[in-house]
Image (cartoon, coloured by chain):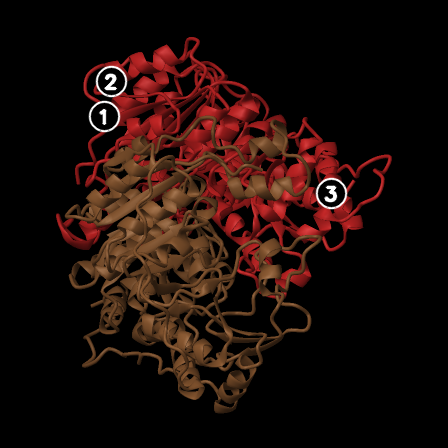
Chain colours: A brown, B red
Amino acid sequence: MNGADALVATLHANGIDLVFANAGTSEMHVVAALDGVPDLRPVLCLFEGVATGAADGYARVSGDVAATLLHLGPGLANGWANLHNARRAGVPVLNVVGVHPDAHDRLDPPLSSRVSQLAASLGGAVTTVHRTADVPAAAAQAITGARHPRAQVSTLLVPADVAWSPFGPAPRRWPAVAAHEPVAPAADDVVRAIGWLRTGRAALVVGGSLSASDLSRAATVVGATGARLLVETFPTIMDHGASTPSPERIVYLSDFAVPQLSGLDRVVLAGAAEPVGFFAYPDLPSRLLGAQCQVLDLCGNGADPATALADLAAAAGTGPGPGGATPPPAVPSGPLTPLTFAAAVAATVPEGAVVVDEANTGGVHLYDALAAAAPHRLMTLTGGAIGFGLPAALGAALGSHGPVIALVADGALQYTAQALWSLAREDLDVTVVVVANATYDILRLERARLGPLPTSGASHLLTDLGAPVIDHVSLARAYGVPARRVESADELVTALARRAVGHTGPELIEVPLAPLAL
Amino acid sequence: MNGADALVATLHANGIDLVFANAGTSEMHVVAALDGVPDLRPVLCLFEGVATGAADGYARVSGDVAATLLHLGPGLANGWANLHNARRAGVPVLNVVGVHPDAHDRLDPPLSSRVSQLAASLGGAVTTVHRTADVPAAAAQAITGARHPRAQVSTLLVPADVAWSPFGPAPRRWPAVAAHEPVAPAADDVVRAIGWLRTGRAALVVGGSLSASDLSRAATVVGATGARLLVETFPTIMDHGASTPSPERIVYLSDFAVPQLSGLDRVVLAGAAEPVGFFAYPDLPSRLLGAQCQVLDLCGNGADPATALADLAAAAGTGPGPGGATPPPAVPSGPLTPLTFAAAVAATVPEGAVVVDEANTGGVHLYDALAAAAPHRLMTLTGGAIGFGLPAALGAALGSHGPVIALVADGALQYTAQALWSLAREDLDVTVVVVANATYDILRLERARLGPLPTSGASHLLTDLGAPVIDHVSLARAYGVPARRVESADELVTALARRAVGHTGPELIEVPLAPLAL
């Protein structure tokens, strides 16, 4: 048994049974150690951003640590953007990163880099194992870093010599990290929150990972207090669809969010942060709430949103029950538009599916349309680093063992399109719907704030994806994923409905949409 | 005129006429400013690793600063791996990265991250502009950072409010950064080096950017002194081919490099670092030179390798001239093997082409075969972060205005395959040859050191790319690049030869190769 064996054994003893991997020479002993533990299965990703996005998606659906295996500084850097999204989602991800032995690194070989500093720039825990004997403790410490009360991205740097050196016999038990115990909000805060929510110009803003019970409790609270119920723009994962209360979503663009929130004097946060503009603008405030609005964060002490909502519901007493049954979504017909696209997805989403939304501008109607759909779980782009959707769908499919619908904008798809290959290799029930408007449409919109949108020059060149047009059917086939292009809402409904009955491997559906009219 | 206009004007005044870009909302004022300076043309890349790899390739062929425009922390992170390669190449790259205004960032919006720390982890200069009035000076400082005596990756962080705020009227002149003046090695060192090289167990090791004159001077030196002439394993860019001396290349694998170098007691470095193993191994030294070998780095004082080689040649006096004319490369026939692949490339490379080598294990014979080819320039994977080849070919084609041959392993291609789209959009004369063995072959080899290679389990799963097989013809077509697959050396020669006469847009050629027999 060597250090790599001890590492793999410790991960496995802590319930990690999957690792999204793109290993290299410096991780070869870890790879060999994985051969000895078939219950800890590696999933090969052709690019590290796929591995980290998959870990994020896996952690969101499973609620527990997802692991990656990455190669030195460049591997971690390639995974950084989706780790940023995972950090913003507040889910536990453990990166195992092979690095050079200290003595080798000091000679400045080609792949030497400031990997500790790079890891620290992710904002979570960074643990370096210096001695083979310390591997189990260091691995446990890194898992603890991921299972932080506010879950984190935790990075374990494993020098190759630590991995290859003899560890000695296995101990009787490998160190096990206890799951984090939920923390309750301060009782005083709960009482104060209820008082605030009864003032008539108040809202409860929920966010993070939201189960149907969490949302029902939130609905109870606002029913009893008369407050508004809002959800952050980009929750981690939420139960959604018919029979689950669907809170009003805070609008992405500050232009609309400011008037949406302007009537509020008191805001109670449960799992959400105070609403802040995604970007800064010269003529719009960064804080989306009015200057007069007071904010109480029930989870500011590290409390669990589920516990906070349960405590709030208990304190609020009962109010009017939820409204009548939601009518099922109408089946759309006719041309493909953001509205008919959203309706087609809503009309066909299989019960229990995970829906990954990275459709961006093309997906503007999805949240509302899906409120009437079969019960599902919705994941969104928490950190704004695009290239999340396809990898997250890979992880979600492996974590949920159920169908996944990935709604991905054509621009976003290009950051991590290699995930298609892993979907095919793992034969996952993932339907990838590519919303193809052949532009960076959000950037056209942002550019149009500054004056008429030029039809040539830099502003055109840097927002146009239409020359050449990307053929997503060819792209999918390159990776062994069957694909088709639809030309109408009717064809999209047919294609999606066919997926819902018995097709299990991945498929890609290209949905052409016109860019926004500006 | 706003801060963004001042930034673009300063870049342009310093000779930057191209920027490899993947911008977002926080860079929108910079994009709008580019509209006003048509001589500074943006090249859209669908992923930041394409932009940074292209900047690296552009800087290698042009010898001067290449610029990127990137979006916040995730954009910089996505570009990090190829910036690592650029750093290792010692070429000047300037990243302009849009970030949030300070006041906005303090509210911790979704895209907020530790971007300064991330930039610092690249090891080069990091400059943040705090006030709009400081934009020209800060941009000049960042360009100075890139034009460091040992060229660096320099990053300029531009908060959005700095970009959008009024700058006032343009100054009479924008600050201009002088090109770096070459530094000469210490005269004593040159004398000592010549003495060393005459000892009979000595080598001159060259590296970095090597022109034909540099290599001729190096050949003169070893001719006059009787020393061996070696080139580092991964030089930045070198003139190569018939009529240019082709130094013996230090072998990539330590197993072979140690015996290759074992006869040396004195090594003189000119532009190369002391040879160090790419990776550490339990049973091999990290330093590839024997313990008895003394090392003299002529460029240790920041001296320019070209000047060092000129000074050495002047001090060495004349020796025997170069050998007779190299016979032209033989045209191969028959099955595709690493040898016939290399021969086919050598037999067809157009004079003046840039050859980008990221063929990895499939390219093991390229360097030697190309020594007899038409004169060309050869670029290699300096930093070991794969995903370099295709982006570097994009940048090299834009920087050289001539034909480029990109030799890319199938595994490596998957890190930055999106570069194909930019090749099509820019209609560049780039021939992409994908060496497709459907494995991470180098990892199979590394894994085989540890014992018999398993045919299932983790070691197999993490090195096998054959399930599903990637269809590179479909992949290229997805991005508007014509493509074909060849099945023999004869077909490869025909396909490459056809490219050399008049075809100017990009084309991809898939070359199936068997994995190494282990």
Residue at the location (53% across, 21% down)? B319
Crowdedness near tag 1: few (<14), some (14–19) or many (≥20) residues, C-alpha within 10 Å: many
Q: Which residue matches tag 2?
A: B489
Q: Disc 2 or 3, which lies upstream in sequence?
A: 3
The residue singled out by tag 3 in the image is B140
Residue B317 pos. (x, y %)? 59, 24
Residue B14: numbered disc? none
**Image quadrant in which the N terminus of chain B is located:** top right
Residue at image mark 1: B337
- Along the viewing direction, whichever of A226 and A430 lies nearer the viewer: A226
| Three-letter code for the amino acid on which mark 3 is drawn | Ala
Residue contact between numbered discs 2 and 1, judged by CB atoms under 8 Å? yes
Q: Is A60 left, or right, of B194 in this rendering?
A: left
Q: Residue at x 24, y 18 (%)?
A: B489
Amino acid type, residue under disc 2 in the picture: Ala
Q: Is residue A350 left or right of residue A282?
A: left
Point 44% across, 9% down: residue: B502
Residue B170, image x and y in percent?
A: 83, 38
Establish whether labels 2 and 1 are both on one chain: yes
Picture quadrant of residue B183: top right
Q: Secondary structure at mark 2?
A: helix
Report the chain holding disc 2: B
